[in-house]
Image (cartoon, rainbow, N blue to C red):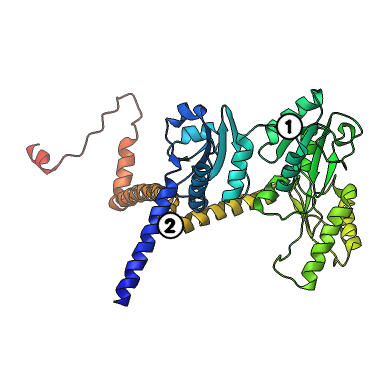
Amino acid sequence: MAAWRRGVALRLCATVVLLDMAFCKGFVEDLDESFKDSRKDDIWLVDFYAPWCGHCKKLEPIWNEVGLEMKSIGSPVKVGKMDATSYSSIASEFGVRGYPTIKLLKGDLAYNYRGPRTKNDIIEFAHRVSGALIRPLPSQQMFEHVQKRHRVFFVYIGGESPLKEKYIDAASELIVYTYFFSASEEVVPEYVTLKEMPAVLVFKDETYFVYDEYEDGDLSSWISRERFQNYLTVDGFLLYELGDTGKLVAIAVIDEKNTSTEHTRLKSIIQEVARDYRDQFHSELKVPTVVVLNTSNQQYFLLDRQITNAEDMVQFINNILDGTVEAQGGDSILQRLKRIVFDAKSTIVSIFKSSPLMGCFLFGLPLGVISIMCYGIYTADADGGYIEERYEVSRSEIESPEQIEESKAQQEPRTGDSPVPAVQEPKDVLEKKKD
């Protein structure tokens, strides 16, 4: 009886899970070729996937939760997914080159999502990009609310000006990464000091920095550099974004859960260097740490000393800048080939792990066809040579030396005035008897 009850309970749990999955899927639309003509009517958040992609399968339950959340909060953004292998022409039109690819489509614009594939991060991206490009801050209360909610954000202060036009252009390009606001001088906190108006400020790390056109150069480039905190936790997606800056990126390889003296000491040293030596390194180095990557040429630098204090960390960075520390890796042809082989190997392994049958079909079928073709070409050449060689050998064995000499004599012409008689074929036994 108890076993029967457990079985019933398990079946009920499985039914609830399946119903929950089906309920979540109901808020994600499966898109087809008709989406090309109707997409401009709404704002769309679309996942372009491939059925055999392992990362796509991991994203599917998260994507269903995104669709449910966006529907429950009344967001104007519609959530959908499209099989990029079945509708390759539409995927190519939107510049899809890998799977999964997440894009927010707003009118004629398409914004790529490069962040972590979590529900909250994806929803945050959708809210940021689907809303106003420049959000106004009408009061100090609103400014304080934004400051508590966002770790990094940019604010334009002033009226109409060429700087505001540049600010709008930069926001249209970088809205996928950060928030852009506008405010009057009365709205910003009292501790903010402005030498001139209009101005563009970035608020982060419990302080602010003012854009200087003469020292900082292009506004978009400055925003791309300043949109990162001085010290932050790096994952694969953030490291990819840091690579777009072309700067040296220093990474501390530490265990956040390890509370030993060595781990906490190294973490505090790195935080101190990132905070106190910003002006010395931040134009050349984004986050001072242990492993330093040069994203412009794919070189990296390993620690050459034991870091015991902030001065050791500063000396290590200075040694990298003056060339004392030997660089490894790079962007040479050999290194590129190694990366291509590694990427290809990783892709093949991931396909076979996620879907062995699909992997056998994608790679086994072409290899089998090529092998059969090569075998057919090889055996065809070998058989032809064998037949020809066999024919020549059999002919030499059949003809005797006397027959060969007689054949040569019959082919030689007679000299003199008399015409050369035609060579007659030898008569057989019946013809001789008739004569």
* Label 2: few (<14), some (14–19) or many (≥20) C-alpha neighbours in 10 Å: some
Q: Quadrant of the N terminus?
A: bottom left
- Alpha carbon distance from label 2 to label 1: 45 Å
Q: Secondary structure at mark 2?
A: helix
Query: Is 144 displayed left or right of 426 in the figure?
Result: right
* Front-lying residue, 145 or 243: 145
Q: Quadrant of the C terminus?
A: top left
Q: Residue at x 69, y 45 (%)?
A: 241
Write down the residue under mark 2: 356
Q: In this orientation, does residue 61 appear? A: yes
- Amino acid type, mark 2: Pro
Q: Which numbered marker is on residue 170? A: 1
Q: Is residue 63 above or below residue 86?
A: below
* Front-lying residue, 398 or 384: 384
Within the image, what quadrant is residue 255 found in?
A: bottom right
Residue 222, position in %: x, y? 80, 37
Q: Is residue 259 above or below residue 102?
A: below
Closer to the chain start, of discs 2 and 1, is 1
* Front-lying residue, 105 or 152: 152
- Amino acid type, mark 1: Ala
Q: Which numbered marker is on residue 324? A: none
Residue 17, position in %: x, y? 41, 58
Q: Secondary structure at mark 1?
A: helix
Q: Residue at x 34, y 35 (%)?
A: 412
Residue 312, position in %: x, y? 89, 62
Residue 343, position in %: x, y? 59, 51
Query: Is 341 displayed left or right of 433 in the figure?
Result: right
* Front-lying residue, 409 or 398: 398
Mark in the foreground, 2 or 1: 1
Q: Residue at x 79, y 23 (%)?
A: 160
